Image: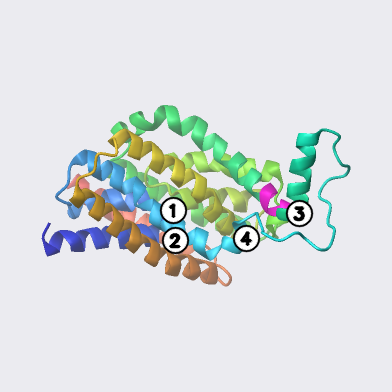
């Protein structure tokens, strides 16, 4: 590969790192960029690359939110906290009981149950329809229309949300029902151009979460969703990489990781003082430009 090809890989990593977390659709942008910046790789590899590169972005969430997400510790708690109402009589359950009491942060384990529950709707819908969506929806027209439609939705919802106060402002007050409802909204992100983060943020705001909590829970949902999607694509591709293909994938993931660190910090700082309407207008303008370009 020549120098220009590596610049294209870096560009794709930058696009992924920015758009994975901002509610403007990472898959949609990668599809659009691919229309103008073609990597000299097979179509099968690029289909896999556009999904698996997101693992680099996901790693940024793991690094930034490690303390909120890692549910285990290595030293017995000295405060005698008991997470269970009574000790079980079964010996095997006693071992689990003691392990959880002494070495687990149960609030974080409960958070992971909520995350997994929220992933179920997208998994149930997405797995059987994956090939069909890839064949029929991964094109510039669908992406453009999705950008425009959900841009309008963002503006409308933010205007509606002005008069409301959030009823859920922390992960501990987010119920399993709330988590599941956010997961239902995540199903919308299966349409390219919709944005996974955009769909779940919209869902969170509609059910009453604060913008900060909606964004944060969206980051956490990305971990199992994108690991699962990446594993699916890797298995479909066959894991038969050439040396160049493996290097392209690794470089793209590293760039996506680095850029994602800054993108996540920017978004969390931005929404403390602003709403999401600017992203809605961006989506509308970009969608119209792309639609006109491909029409004429």
Res. 255 mark: none
Asked whether the residues under the numbered discs 3 and 1 touch, taking CB atoms below 8 Å apart as contact, a structural biologist would say no
Q: Nearer the viewer, mark 3 or mark 4?
A: 3
Residue farthest right in this picture: 86
Q: Which residue is mark 2?
A: 279
Q: Position of residue 195 (x, y in %)?
A: 43, 49
Residue range in magenta is: 105-110
- Give the camera-side residue of 11 and 206: 11
Q: Position of residue 92 (x, y in %)?
A: 76, 35
Q: Earlier in the sequence, mark 3 or mark 1?
A: 3
Q: Which residue is mark 4?
A: 68
Residue at point 60% right, 60% down?
211
Q: Quadrant of the N terminus?
A: bottom left
Decide if residue 197 is on the left or right side of residue 216.
Answer: left
Q: Which residue is mark 3?
A: 102
Q: Measure the C-alpha gap from mark 2 to mark 3.
A: 45 Å
Q: How is the image coloured?
A: rainbow
Q: Earlier in the sequence, mark 2 or mark 3?
A: 3
Secondary structure under badge 2?
Answer: helix
Secondary structure under badge 3?
Answer: helix
Q: Earlier in the sequence, mark 1 or mark 4?
A: 4
Q: Nearer the viewer, mark 3 or mark 1?
A: 3
Q: Measure the C-alpha gap from mark 3 to mark 1.
A: 48 Å
Q: Measure the C-alpha gap from mark 1 to mark 2.
A: 7 Å
The 10 Å Cα crowd at callout 3, few under 14, some 14 to 19, many 20 or more, is many
Q: Nearer the viewer, mark 4 or mark 2?
A: 4
């Amino acid at each position: 590969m020549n120098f220009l090809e590596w610049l294209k890989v870096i560009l794709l990593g930058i696009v992924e790192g920015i758009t994975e977390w901002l509610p403007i659709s990472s898959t949609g942008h990668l599809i659009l960029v691919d229309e103008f910046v073609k990597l000299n790789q097979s179509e099968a590899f690029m289909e896999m690359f556009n999904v698996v590169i997101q693992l680099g972005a996901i790693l940024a969430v793991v690094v930034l939110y490690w303390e909120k997400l890692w549910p285990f510790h290595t030293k017995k708690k000295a405060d005698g906290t008991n997470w269970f109402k009574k000790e079980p009589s079964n010996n095997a359950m006693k071992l689990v009981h003691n392990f959880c009491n002494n070495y687990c942060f149960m609030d974080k384990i409960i958070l992971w149950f909520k995350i997994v529950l929220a992933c179920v709707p997208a998994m149930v819908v997405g797995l059987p329809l994956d090939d069909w969506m890839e064949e029929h929806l991964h094109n510039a027209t669908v992406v453009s229309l999705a950008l425009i439609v959900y841009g309008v939705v963002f503006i409308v919802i933010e205007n509606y949300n002005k008069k409301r106060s959030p009823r859920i402002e922390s992960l501990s007050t987010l119920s399993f029902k709330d988590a599941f409802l956010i997961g239902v909204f995540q199903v919308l992100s299966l349409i390219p151009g919709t944005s996974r983060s955009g769909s779940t943020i919209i869902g969170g705001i509609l059910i009453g979460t604060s913008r900060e909590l909606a964004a944060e829970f969206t980051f956490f949902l990305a971990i199992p969703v994108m690991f699962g999607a990446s594993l699916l694509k890797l298995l479909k591709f066959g894991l038969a990489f050439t040396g160049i293909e493996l290097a392209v994938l690794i470089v793209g993931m590293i760039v996506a990781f680095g850029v994602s660190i800054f993108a996540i910090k920017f978004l969390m700082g931005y929404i403390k003082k602003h709403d999401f309407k600017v992203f809605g207008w961006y989506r509308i303008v970009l969608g119209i430009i792309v639609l006109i370009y491909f029409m004429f």
